[in-house]
Image: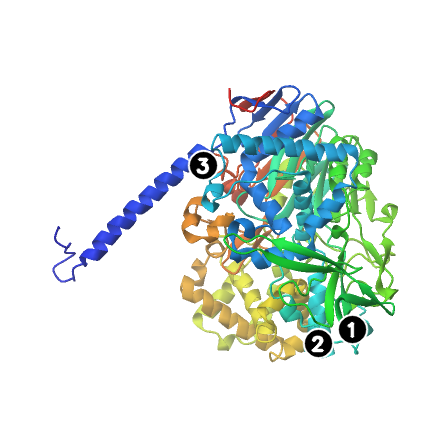
Amino acid sequence: MSAPIEISKNRKRFPKWIKVTSTILIVIVLIVAGTGLYLTKKSLPSIKGNLTISTLYRKVEVVRDGKGVPHISAKSLHDLYVAQGFVTAQDRLFQMDLSRRQASGQLSEVIGDATVERDSYFRTLGLRRAAEASYSKYDKNGQNVLNWYAEGVNAYIKYAIKEKKLPVEFKILKYKPSKWTAIDSLVIGKYMAFDLGGHWNEQAFRYYALNKFPKDKALELFPANNDLDPYIIPSNTSKIDVEKSFASAIIPPVWNGSNDWVVSGAKTKSGKPLLADDPHLGLATPAIWYETQLKSGDMNVSGVIFAGVPGIIVGHNEHIAWGVTNVGPDVQDLYIEKRNPNKSDEFLYDGQWEKAQVINETIKIKGKKNKVLPVMITRHGPVISEFASDAGKDTVFSLQWTALQPTTELEAVLKFDVAKDWNSFKEGLALFEAPAQNFVFASDDGTIAYRANGKIPIRKKGDGLMPVPGWTSDYGWKGSIPYDELPTIVNPKEGFISSANNKVVDDSYPYHISNSWAQPYRQLRIQEVLKKNDKLTVKDMQKLQMDEMNLQAKEHAPKFIKSINQNKDQLSSVEKSALKELEKWNFIDDKDEASPLIFQMWMTEINKALFDQQISNDMMDLFGDRKVVVDQLLRDSLNGKKVIWVDEQGGIDKLLLKTFKSTIKNISKTDGENAAKWKWGDHHKVAFEHPLSSIKVLSYFFNARDPIPVGGSATTVKAAGYDDQGIVDHGASWRTVVDFADLSKSVNIVGPGQSGNLGSKWYSDQMEDWANGTYHTTSLKNVKGVKEMFEPGKTKKK
């Protein structure tokens, strides 16, 4: 054995075991890395040359352009959707499998104990049950498309297993994907309705707040200008422990929203319409969106779809373009149900005990015994307040939700893809019920239009603000807003229409849509830019999508500064330096500036001061209106109104001074005391994390690169919401601009890239593009790139 290494004459020697262990670890890491690289490369799909697919009728051509976007051309719709299923699986099979498992409550089957509560929640909701009920509502054409797509996915699964081409994630988790079905595609659609929410959590939070705090204090946490009638919380009913019931509930990110706008030819340089859309969802690897072109017969459409679903849900064809944002309507109601103390499956309704449907959901758990979860479904919907605890309570919450009803969104999508004008596009809108979306539209005849579209319930009593009694018919739904009366605009005199999850209509509208709207700042900024320019171009649209002007800061920061200046003698030198940075700020959330960091962290400290000692983290997760409410609390207090939550902190001036000091102290600990050198981007970075990267060692493989500093924030048009660690995890995974001066192309970004396959050159090639606003062009014709031909016959490589 060799002698230990001596570092220096005056230092201790390393023990032999450290040297040996270090060497072994280095060798193991090199072996693992080498094996991983080999498996990764081996599992990459073959996307060049000829491949036979047994279910095809005729040849199909697939050309992947320079960004990996597949352009699929087929002679028949059957072959087109078979090919779309096959091609999407080539790039996104693991994501597709994980998506259907998550929505169906089947993750534990391949992961184990860690996801049992999550599975229990989704089994209770019943997204898969809703998908199964929806399938029978589809017409023959819709069912055919779903099944043709499934044929293509299954052809690739069979091929990948045989040729050992399954993505490396399957090898890590040690399982193989099961057969794809039409229901799998529909349940992914139902999950998107879940992800875009419906406000049951806010109802639960308000119920909690009114039971925990004095009424006037609780009401300050409600949406502004509400007309709460407290009688809807009956005094003779046992209170439900919201905190215990929903501690494990899965709550979608607050304001999974979007931006979109459309401009008429009267306001563009070309004299033709422009349409821009950037839907905001989770930012991860792979991208939630998958860009594709589909061409067959008269159909030639390009855009994006969720991996696992056929068609194109947002995009353009040779005549029209359309984009979406979330309406965010009140389409969910919590019902307070009275249970029969002698029979746990009976609930009171109009004086009679009514038997609930009980479905025993079997959750398979990797390496463990199955868990049988009894799900009770009342006339209103599933009992969701007991999924993580034992039954037997005399009062529970059930959930009524439009997305749990049979719906036919795919039929709508198929009509969108071939529509030629506003009238034919509206035929599709009539079929698109859940989730409710703001659609903006333009066509080559110059029409621009908008509709808040979807199934929005009309209530007999109440307005979706609070949970309501389930034991009486007084609070049921009595249909939905008539299709012809949904908010609609066609060719407005302003020459543009924009949407950013803001309030859709004024109070003169005869129907209730929502109590909860997004902060208004993105919409205000979009309108500000569009109003002042009558020669708009594609470049202007791209610039606006990447706009970092923070109008929330523009509203609040000057008043904050004025308040702090009243107590300037109490500031330290670093606090004075930080205040100076704020005073010269132009309100742009630039990644290289100190002021955005100070303001964002200050708002965080204000939130903590107001709520941390009084509301638990679990309940804060239910508080979906928090940002809007805090804006209003600050606005009212700064304008001299009495605000209990602020007054408890000693008033607005004391609150601002205390939180400013804690903000500067926190930043100084990590960034030093020279405020001029602080940078927002050091605390605000986009990572596009892979689901398996939660396992630390795997993060080095699946997360493509170090996080990238970015500007913007949750309130800028360039939406960049972030978590507690400063990782940007919510924003526009897809950005598109369509110019009607040339409908044969569009400019787009799909962050972080098209492929979900580690090792693909398209795995993360758009990560920098996303951060910097570098768009690629996608064409409808004369596409060049990597060509693959699919032919009828036995599935094997030629």
**Is residue 643 among what the camera can see?**
no
Whether label 2 touches label 1, CB < 8 Å: yes
Q: Give the residue type that dot 3 points to.
A: Gly
Q: Distance between the residues labelled 2 and 1?
A: 9 Å
Residue occupied by mark 1: 233
Locate residue 714, reporting x and y percent.
Answer: 60, 55
**Is residue 601 among what the camera can see?**
yes
The relative height of residue 578 versus residue 218 in the rendered view (above or below) is: above
The residue drawn where x is 65% and y is 76% is 645
Q: How far apart are marks 3 and 1 (CA)?
A: 56 Å
Q: In this view, does 58 lie to the left or right of 338?
A: left
Quarter of the image where one finds residue 392 = bottom right
The residue drawn where x is 64% and y is 25% is 55
Q: What element carries label 2?
A: helix
Residue occupied by mark 3: 759
Nearer the observer, 304 or 637? 304
Q: What element carries label 3?
A: loop
